[in-house]
Image (tube, coloured by chain):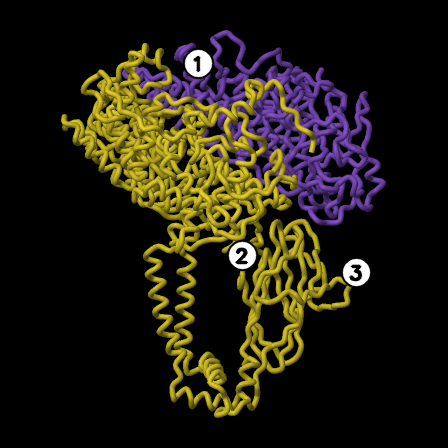
Chain colours: A purple, B yellow
Amino acid sequence: MHDVTEQTRRAFLSQGIGAIAASQLLGRAPTGNQGPGQAPKGRRHAPRAKRVIHLYMAGGPSHLETLDEKPALAALDGQPMPESFTRGQPIAQLQGQRLVCLGPRFPFASFGQSGQRICARFPHIGSVADEIAIIRSMQTDQINHDPAHTLFNTGNTNPGRPSMGSWINYGIGSECDDLPGFVVLSSVGRGGQAQPIAARQWSAGFLPSRFQGVEFRSKGDPVLYVNNPPGVTRQQQREAVDTIGRLNSLHDGVVADPEIATRIAQFEMAFRMQRSVPELTDLGNEPSEVLDLYGVEGQDGSFASNCLLARRLAERGVRFIQVYHRAWDHHGGIERAIGLTADEVDRATAALILDLKRRGMLDDTLVLWGGEFGRTPMGQGNGRDHHIRGFSYFMAGGGVRGGVSHGATDELGYRAVEDVVHVRDLHATILHLLGIDYDRLSQRFQGLDVRLTGVEHAEPIWPILA
Amino acid sequence: MQRRRWTSALAWVAAAAPAAIAQSNPSHWAYQPPREVAIPLPDGEGWARSPIDAFVLDRMERDGHVPAAEADARTLVRRLAFDLTGLPASPGQVDAVAADPTGSAFVALVDELLASPQFAERMAMHWLDLVRFADTTGVHADNPWDIHPYRDWVIRAFLDNMPFDRFTREQLAGDLIPDADTSQRVAAAYNRLNLITREGGSQPKEFLARYTADRVRNLSTVWLGSTVGCAECHDHKFDPIRTRDFYRLGAFFADIEQVGVYSQGAPKDRYFGPYVKVPTAEQERALDALADRAAAARLILDTQTPELDAAQAAWERATLAEPPLPPRLGPWHAAGPFRGKSLSDVHRQRFWPEDGVDLEASVDGAPAWTPHPEWTDGVPHNLSGGNSAYYLFRTIDVVRPQRVTLRFGSDDAIRVWVDGELLLDREVQRGVAPDQERVDVELAPGRHQLVAKISNGAGGFAFFFRSEADHVPEDILDRLTTAADARSQADRDAVSTWFRSTTPLLEAARLQLASLETERAALEDQVAVCMATVSTEPMTTRVLRRGDWMDESGEVVSPGVPAAFGALPTTDGRPTRLDLADWLLADDHPLVARVFVNRLWRLFFGRGIVATLDDFGTQGARPTHPELLDWLARRFVESGWDVRAMVRLLVTSSTYRQSSSCSPETARSDPYNEWFARQARFRVDAEVVRDQALAVSGLLVPELFGRSVRPYQPEGFYQHLNFPRRRYEQDAGEALWRRSLYTHWQRQYLHPALAAFDAPSREECTVERGRSNTPLQALVLLNDPILVEAARALGARAMREGGTDVTSRISFLFRTVLARTPTDEEAAVLTEHVARLLAQYANDRPAADALLDVGEREVYSDLDPAELAAWTGAGRVMLSLHETLTRS
């Protein structure tokens, strides 16, 4: 903690009051100890992506019914899972039970010029096959939702570490002055149970709290406390902010406290947010053609409307946008559940990629699609259990090659065997594309230089980078 | 497991050869006991009030610094009140100190505040961050648990100025103290504050390893100021902490009764492991009185009189003529699980003929009914499967018309049929407990069919059953058949006891006893419970290589302290948490006292003598004033670990009383205030932002202790919680205006206004909160209903107590909130604001009413709404000022 304070203070001393005031605005501008005009602390090379949209398929999508085709598993449907695959492996809810193969519930098809093999139940995603890079060799360390999300977001399973979005804003700042640099959206679906999500997942951990993710809600105030109290007009709020600012300035004349300039600026920023947030979340001025593309009628809290909202946030310069869809925990009835969930995400996911592309934003917007882990090739009744040894992700835009795939699992989709990509490698890839040296973006905490990618070796997925 | 590679780019690995450091750093300053140091004699005369000042001034003089001037009385008293109580100073306190040039009024105020309950609350806020006290489990579903008595214990300990050694010992090992009382057992709940999971599919062994690691991290941060957590997976790179040391420390906690994955199906009193009951003194008295009355009633029931003798003889004859037998229940049979989409679905769906049972029935060729003779009555039995149902079946045979009471517990929903008739239908989501449901049936002689259907959503799945019926037990009947004069004393006692328990002659006493029992149960239900630390057979502790819980090849270790710190004195048998406490509290322990006084120093001076409060190791900051730190540490131990005396020493020093203002030159030459040549200036803590608003507006309810409270919170804030889904049940009445340290602390969704001002989630130990300055804070200050309500109450105070004209009311506001008078310019700015609002609200009565309607505190009907709305606006400004939020 002390280091952050010291850097802030040092930045103030070297840049003067105005500079620090600007740098305090929800993480806008870097916090490092560089002087004006220097490159931000975290950025070491030219960025390919300016911002990230993480379509976070929370609950753990089955790779076997989305991105990883396994005919051999279909052939073994109903047969015992060969023990050679599973011996000594951690298993979640199937602990101690007879392990039986469950064949994939849907056929796969070739899509696009690249001919990428994608589950036929996701034809819209298939339609953008030439834009996406599919990773079929993901691995994680955590087999239950809460710790797996914590690992995926922070690189560590102990609470208290900063999340990806916080690290990125800490490293290279935000580009907008009336919205937070890290925004979280969330929806629930009809298939699968809505596993809980902790606010820890978008916490700034030990970084200053201005780098924390801010949740935009679809019900109630879109941002907590963003609406005026009843009986207070926007003009009256303006006057209140002015009066507070004038009194704060008068006091600054007496005590010369640099924090006062920051405080005044933060009230201004808050006031701007009070206007910009409702404008942003009002989808009413989107043309009907755009609404049709995403398959929404307005802001209804659905994944599809959140995808559209994500594009609007990206347009306004928000650095890291995380769109949770809490619908993928398919322990039972996976065939029906995948169908329901596909209806919710397939079209909107493709729409977002197409929409970004036609606006020229896909080049510098990195889109990620996937969950905190995958699901077992073994059935859990007619569903699948959590699985960490092999699962899939796809990425698009922001310096990633389209129409390619990377890595592979074994013939039953149990274990990633070719070009294994750990979560920390995904982190390294994201940071690298943003122009950040992932090994150097660190913060001293409890005696350790903590970094998102952790202490073990991490490496960007070079073959999929354009 | 994939072999790990350590990235070569990491400076902290490459910078040094770890082995060499680990060998050499036992000489590191923090591993030597605090030295006896001479108090220096600095040149500057008249400034030093205490040895603290001598150390600080001596250090300043070496670099040519001079102390800042003493702060004015108003700044000093405001600072003191924030520091000692977390509440603003009253104008009267400022006046008293300002009026006394001798300084004795200041010291008197220090003593007054140190003795106040608010001091205890303020110190508790600090301690609760350290031990990660919260009201919920922290993982996955983040369910609430019963822990608030521990928080109250901490407050009471500071209120009683409990010495820090006892404070430490009772938390780590209160349960092991011989004849531990309730208070000590509550203190030991410290050991239960780690995050725990109930998530289905979790690996129990993995979580047991996590719980141990969590406890070791907390112990070593709070008491040792050391990063022992680094050694979970590898020997510490720089400090003399080996992986083995980490697990030996963990072994001290291996005796704590716990499970890796807690079960939703567990009965309520075992939900998160063992509990201790914590009655208030009043409840204890009431329970004693009830027990006395019950004893009197029981005496009547236990006393055989001649009248009863006669009645018994008549009863014996009648009973022998026609013996009433108990119903005979067949063994349970079960069919299932039958799966569905949801709890509601499986509960309502008819999977099976529910009105008649065929034990030979089969599903897909396999017999559907499985006998379960092992399912005894009176204890819960587990079933398994999510979103599924089981049918349970057994027969009941009676030989005469008989009234039978069937009692059930179920997790979750339940339906009960007798002879095909649906008698109970309860769609509910809950954990199982005895006697949750009662079904009374009048049975005709013959065989009857009892069918129960238990339906489960997620998590635990279980049922409970027992039955009661009026009958004479067989052993009594046996004794009756012996002629009265041939019976042994034991026979006679057994028969008359049974008789008295059923005879109508004693019905009144029995009813009275039953009603006393009901009363007692109701009262017991109100008694607070607290998760308890219960010592049991220690589980095996192994060194986990690379921290991998699946690796069982590591050495089995016994409890012990890090080898670099020596060894525990040899004792008989396995060292316990009491031995751990003794080791920490040895007079010459190098870390414990230093770490504690250093954190206290930070509370009152803004930064530690060692800036890294949580890292006294070789990678941490060096102390800026090593002699002062040692002197304070020794003084603390020699005083008998007297916390209040130490705080008094700190805040009465000249160092403390300095102004926080400094020249730009000083700011440049000592930007971090390392030499303490001025006081610190920082934003008040999250709780204080709200508590101050409550205090100055008069809304504050200063009650101490009790269950956590739920003040206003934005609708839907818990929408991402599940198992079960959560709805925030906002409190009503006084609970809305309690101090913020009593606010329900939901680890995964901490109250957003507290979180906005850097209150930690308390998932991990927090030694030092951030002090950020963000737009979200401005949104809270402007728009949070509690601040709007406080502004209204403050505005009403200005109108009632601040005189009749605008100027005097504005003076009242400044005096009440900031303990000073406004400058003319300030008064003019606020006057203009009030005038504008007054004009606006005078023309818009509905807007005024809407603003005044915020919050549950009743509207002040004696005040003009437009005027009060305008003064509410003034109150909002006052509560949002930077100066209001700043301790300087």
Tell me the residue that label 1 is attached to.
A11
- The picture places residue B413, in percent across and down from the top left corner, at 60, 57
Give the quarter of the image for residue B867.
Answer: top left
Q: Position of residue B801 (x, y in %)?
A: 21, 35
Instruction: Say which of marks 3 and 2 sits in front.
Output: 2
The amino acid pointed to by label 1 is: Ala
- Between disc 1 and disc 3, the foreground one is 1
Q: CA distance from mark 2 to mark 1?
A: 56 Å
Residue A216 x/y as whole percent: 53, 30
Q: Is residue B43 above or below residue A325?
A: above
Q: Are marks 2 and 1 on the same chain?
A: no
Residue closer to the observer: A295 or A88: A88
* Marks 3 and 2 in Cβ contact (< 8 Å): no
Instruction: Give whichever of B345, B164 is nearer the camera.
Output: B164
The residue at which mark 3 appears reads as B366
Q: CA distance from mark 3 to mark 2?
A: 33 Å
Chain holding disc 2: B
Measuring from the top left, give residue A135's x and y in whole percent. 73, 26
- The secondary structure type at the circle numbered 3 is strand
User: Up-down: is B332 above or below B114?
Assistant: below
The residue under the point 54% across, 42% down is: B211
Residue kind at label 3, given as amino acid type: Ala
Q: Which residue is mark 2?
A: B267
**Amino acid under label 2?**
Pro
Residue drawn at (42%, 67%), measured in percent from left and top?
B517
Q: Chain of mark 3?
A: B
Residue reaching furthest right?
Answer: A75
Is label 2 in a helix, a strand or a loop?
loop
Badge 2: how crowded within 10 Å, few (<14), some, or many (20+)? Answer: some
